Image (cartoon, rainbow, N blue to C red):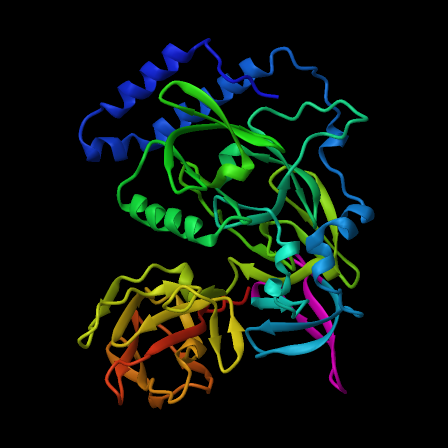
Amino acid sequence: MFAAAKEPNRDRKGAGRKATRQQGNEATRRGNRAATVRERSTNRAVTVRERNTNRAAGACCAARLVLTTALLCAHPAAQAIAPPDTNEVTATTLSDVAVRGCLRTFSLEDGLRMEPSGDVGPVIRPADEVVQIVVHHEPRWAVSPEQRIPVEVRLVGGDRLFGEPVQPQDDREHNPAEETVLFETAVFGVLEVPLPLIERWVNTTHNRTAGDALERKRNHRAKTPSLDDRLLLSNGDVVHGILLAIDDRQLTFESDGIEMTVPHSQVAAVDLISEAHSSGLGLRARVTFVDGSRVTTDELVCSGDGLGLTLFDGPRRTVRLDHVAHIDIVGGRWVRITELPPISVQHTPMLSLPWSYVENANVLGGPMRIANRVFEHGVGVHSESSLMYDLAGEYRWFVTLFGIDDSAGGAPALADVTAEIRVDGQVRHRREHVTPGKLWGPIRIDVGGAARIELRTLFGENASIQDRFNWADAGLIRAAPPAE
């Protein structure tokens, strides 16, 4: 489908890239990074337009989305997990730890209304007081290897999609917009995903070792910004250049002025440069689906049988509720601790190598699990550690659960730490002999008017052996706005 090479504008683009790479010192390169990204995006678009000059045009906008029940049932991810029989959900709000019952309605404008189980009146809460609504409690990784979804697409801002690239249906003409990828998902059908929104493309059918290698290089790249997209091949080689296009068979990549096509079977991952992303202001919903996909939207309405939302491509669509795993509210009064950068990070090793903290995973980078309960949000650390956050007097409460990660189990279980929470230097909570197999909390601490909070994980017995500790579902509650 794509030409093996393309001569027009090759010299101009190569010269521009060379000139960009020869600019100044590293500080100057970082300062001009945003402009370079925009220029590279323009170059990519020009190349795509040249390739598509002789292609048929006049695509129908309605053909951009195929959303049918047959597609939802046919995709392996949709078959992997059986849907629940009812619209029963578990909702966590600022005033209720967790309430299980029948969901009536939820929207970012009108808030939550549900009927709890038992002889309890209806729960009615404004949207900014809702923390999370859990619809489906089964883990995504129950999917068997033969049902593994081929591609994970990570978007700027932390969203992600699982599925596979496709071509238009044979019975109709379709000319997708330039710089887009036709991507088929179990939840939404076929989407047109803009290339500038893609931060990373991962072929999940390959050995995860290759993806992990690029992830380590990606973390290093955060400290040393690059002006290139990076293609990681299945043999471990890395190619620098520009990702031009992706179709159902291959991707097209330009490196040092040479355009090449690479079959998906030879691609482990692609790391794309992208402009800085602003999460925006106002109340938003981050929706996680049973196939592992996650999208953030500022327009969402949920009822007992479906969820309506808008995505990056604009049109509003409806998704079956049984495809939703959970809905997290962002921008309300609840702020997860991982949304704040720590102002101080300290780790004091005891004979062993130092450990860094890990957000939304245990300190080894795996799923965060305490006493057989899995947590998606929190911070994994190793003793002895200290994380300090700036509160600036904006919050009323700090809430967390904590415990030793289950990965530290075994016989005998040697992990033993002291968990300590300090507010403006004063100890507000201390728990000694935190050992495996038990979940502590939720702990609720008054931080009204406080400037700083410090989360400390101290040595207990047995030195630092197996001291893999999790601050799970840790977050802050903003002070309520004054009554009008």
Q: Is residue 300 visible?
A: yes
Of residues 425 and 141, the one drawn nearer to the viewer in this rendering: 141
Q: Position of residue 3 (x, y in %)?
A: 55, 17
Q: If the image is split into quadrants, where does the C terminus sit?
A: bottom right
Residue drawn at 25 percent across, 76 percent down: 384
Residue 350 highlighted magenta (yes or no)? no
Q: Nearer the viewer, residue 236 or 458?
A: 236
Residue found farthest to the front:
235
Which residue occupies the extreme top position in the image? 8
Question: Which residue does the image show at 42% across and 77% down from the upper left?
Answer: 405
Q: Quadrant of residue 84?
A: bottom right
* Count of marks, rendered view: 0
Which residues are drawn in magenta?
106-128
Q: Is residue 125 above or below residue 152?
A: below
Residue 23 to residue 80: above or below? above
Residue 355 location, quadrant: bottom left
Q: Nearer the viewer, residue 387 or 5?
A: 5
Q: Residue at x 62, y 50 (%)?
A: 149
Image x and y of residue 250, in percent: 56, 31
Q: Position of residue 142 (x, y in %)?
A: 63, 65
Q: Give coordinates of residue 429: x percent, y percent.
A: 34, 85
Is residue 451 visible to us here?
Answer: no
Q: Is residue 7 left or right of residue 305?
A: left
Q: Say which residue appears at 43% left-offset and 37% top-offset.
A: 272
Placement of the N terminus among the 4 image quadrants: top right
In the picture, measured across the screen, residue 20 lies left or right of residue 9, that is: left
Residue 42 vs 346, above or below: the answer is above
Which of the 4 image quadrants contains residue 446?
bottom left
Q: Magenta stretch containing residue 110, yes or no?
A: yes
